[in-house]
Image: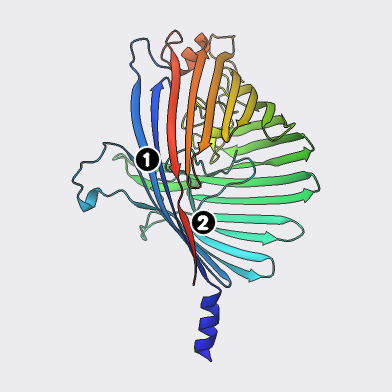
Amino acid sequence: MLALMAMGAMAQSTLKVSGEFRPRSEYSHGYGTLAGLDQKGSLFTSQRTRVNLEFGIKNVKTKVSLQDVRIWGNQPQQVMNEDLAVSIHEAWAETPLIRGLSLRVGRQELNYDNGRILGNSNWNQQARVHDLALLKYSGFVEVHFGLAYHESGNRKNNIYSGPDAYKTLQFLWLNKSFGDLKLSFIGLNNGIPRNTLNDNGEIVSQKIIYTQTFGPYAEYKKGELSFAGSAYYQTGELVNGKSLSAYEYLLETTWKPGKDFSLGAGYEELSGSAADLDPAKARSFNPLYGTGHKFNGHMDYFFVGNHIGSVGLRDLYAKVGYLIKGISLGVDIHQFWAQADLVNKPNRALGTELDFYGSYKINEVTELGIGYSHLLPTETMQLLKGGSADAVQNWAWVMFTFRPAATIKL
């Protein structure tokens, strides 16, 4: 009898095996920060390789994703075992608890709403994952509650000295659809350590300092028009002792009269700290663990590993998309201003960025992507980022993505 039950369970199980091979070549002369007049452009190729195993059986889903990210040429041809760079990208299991309620635990991607606060940052070859427990409820309203608490493995103390951006994190996400309107709310409590050091620079004690980020996100689609918007507020305390009061809001609209053409426009503002503000108060908004490359231009001048704690940003943009014979083309234009004043620089204008990009699906598993971006910076951008506003600032890339997959019924 037990054997028959086991065979019945196995008959309902599936194994999905998939891979991803994503080499991307980039030319950069001003990506992320302004190039100097005498600076030469750089050319490199990075590659992401993944092997994904997803196993599903009655009441249990699991996923293991192995990942290797490298730049071509940064390892010798004859690699020793200790030089291998393969890591676990995702490793989680999920099971239902009661009706409508399930639990997922392990290393996993988080991607909510437009990805501004919690996103998987998929453009980056390494992407972003979290080690946490995720409680999921699906009913009248969709609710996700995430909980993370990180340690370094030293059982003799409670001091965290690991590489992650936080020691503890809790978030709540609520989502509800009302016909053509989708409403979400996210609240995130982010705890990072403040260390006390002795004369030898060793950590002798640690206190967790918390900031809170919360606010709504909305999407509305009706016929050819769609609208999206967010409004987030941040409060709490920073590690440097300053109290935090910051905000972000975004308004965006898209007109899509047919399958082949779209036209969009939007405005986003993220508060910043001016030089003459109260030294005890911080007003710079931090998008935390969002997908930065999706916002504020493809050249990643803002909130992608930089610009945190700075003068904020105002971004007015327009987007045009066109699909012709299986080829997707797009053009974005951004006009940037600092949200707060710079020292001795009343002009807040930072510059204009043009992004051109396209993709073509070669076959069912292969896609080609290309892009070119050009930045026209101001002297204020030069003051903020260094480099030279008189140098040519551009960036180009070409990327192949291969995604083979197969599903096996066991």
Dot 1 falls on a residue whose secondary structure is strand
Query: How many marks can you see?
Result: 2
Q: Secondary structure at mark 2?
A: strand
Please give the residue where the numbered disc 1 appears in the rendered image. 47
The residue under label 2 is 132
Quick one: label 2, few (<14), some, or many (20+) residues within 10 Å? many
N-terminal label among 2 and 1? 1
Residue 45 as seen in the image, left or right of residue 210: left
What is the three-letter code of the residue carrying label 2? Leu
Work out whether 64 lies above or below 403. Answer: below
Residue 288 location in percent, x, y? Answer: 54, 39
**Residue 41 horizontal/vertical position (percent):** 35, 19
**Looking at the rendering, which quadrant does residue 163 occupy?**
top left
Q: How is the image coloured?
A: rainbow
191 or 264, nearer to the observer: 264
| Relative vertical location of residue 221 with respect to residue 397 in this rendering, above or below | below
Q: Farthest residue toward the front?
A: 325
- Nearer to me, 326 or 24: 326
Q: Sort mark 1 into few (<14), some (14-19) or many (20+) by Cα contacts within 10 Å.
A: many
Residue at 60% across / 20% down in the picture?
333
Asked if residue 54 is positioned above or below residue 127 in the image, the reply reads: below
Q: Amino acid at mark 1?
A: Gln
Residue 278 seen from this side: no
Residue at left offset 63%, top offset 22%? 314
Q: Is residue 139 left or right of residue 268?
A: right
